[in-house]
Image (cartoon, rainbow, N blue to C red):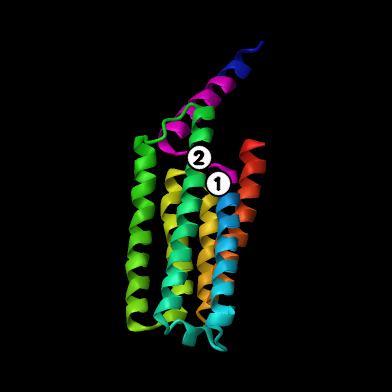
Amino acid sequence: MNQPKDHLDTLHEIRDLMEKSSRFISLSGLSGVSAGIFALFGAAAAFVILQSDSFFYTDYRAALDHTQVLWLLVLDAVITLFLSFVVAMIFTVRQARRKGQAIWSKTAQRLTINMMIPLVTGGVFCLAFLYQGYIGIIAPSMLVFYGLALINGSKYTLHDIRYLGICEIILGLIATFFIGYGLLFWAIGFGVLHIIYGIVMYRKYEK
C-alpha cells in the first residue's frame, strides 16, 4: 500500500543528495541582509565625506579630483567590503554546518572561481576608468560586473541568485544614463537589493 510513497520518498532523497553534490546550497539569506546593511552604511559614509564642511563641493566629480577625498572613499569601500565578507562567511559557515555540507567543497570552489572571473575583470576595468579619470562610470560598471558574476555562479548554487544578478545588471545599465548619481544607484544595488534578496532567501529556505 505504501510502496508508491516509499518510492517517492526515495526519489526525493536521491534528488536532495544530487543537489547537495552539485550545488553549494549553504548561502545564508542573513548574509545578504548584513551585506546590504553594511553597503548602506558605506554609502552614507561616502555621502558624508563628499558633503562634509572640509570637503564640500557642488559637483561630486570635482570632489573626486582631490586625492585626499578619493583615498577616503577607497578606504570606505574597502572597510565595507571587508565587513560584509566577514559577516557573510560567519552566516555561511553556520548554515553549512546545519546542513552538514563542507565549506570548501568542489562545488564551493567552482562557485568561487566562476564568480571571481567577472569580479576580477570588473575590478581591473573600474581601476582603468579611475586611472583615466572616468569616475562617473565606475559605479554602473561595478553593478553590471557584479550582476554578471552572480549569474555566472548561479549554476553552482541556488537559482534565485540569478534573479538578483539580472536586477543588478539592469540597475547598472540604467545608472549609465544618469552619470552623477552613481552613489545612489550603488546604494540601491548593493544595499537595498541585497536586503530584499536576503529576506526572501531567509523566508524561503531558512525560516
Circles 1 and 2: CB atoms closer than 8 Å = yes
Residue shown at 48% from the left, 35% from the top: 93
Q: Where on the picture, by quarter, is residue 7?
A: top right
Majority SS type along the magenta span:
helix
Instruction: Kindly identify which residue carries mark 2.
Output: 90
Q: What element carries label 2?
A: helix
**Above or below, 11 relative to 178:** above
Task: State which region is magenta.
Answer: 8-30
> Which image quadrant is residue 57 in?
bottom right
Residue that appears at 63% across and 18% down: 5
Above or below, 152 against 76 in this view is above
| Residue at mark 1 | 31
The magenta stretch spans residue 9: yes
Residue 199 is left or right of residue 176, and the answer is right
At label 1, which amino acid type do we have?
Answer: Ser
The spot of residue 202 in percent (x, y) is: 63, 42
Question: Does residue 69 belong to the magenta stretch?
Answer: no
The answer to which of 193 and 33 lies nearer the viewer is 33
Across and down, in percent, residue 53 comes to 59, 81
The number of callouts visible is 2
Looking at numbered disc 2 in the image, what kind of residue is underneath it? Ile
Judge whether 33 appears above or below 71 on screen: above
Q: Residues within 10 Å of mark 1 (few under 14, many from 20)?
A: many
Quarter placement of the C terminus: top right
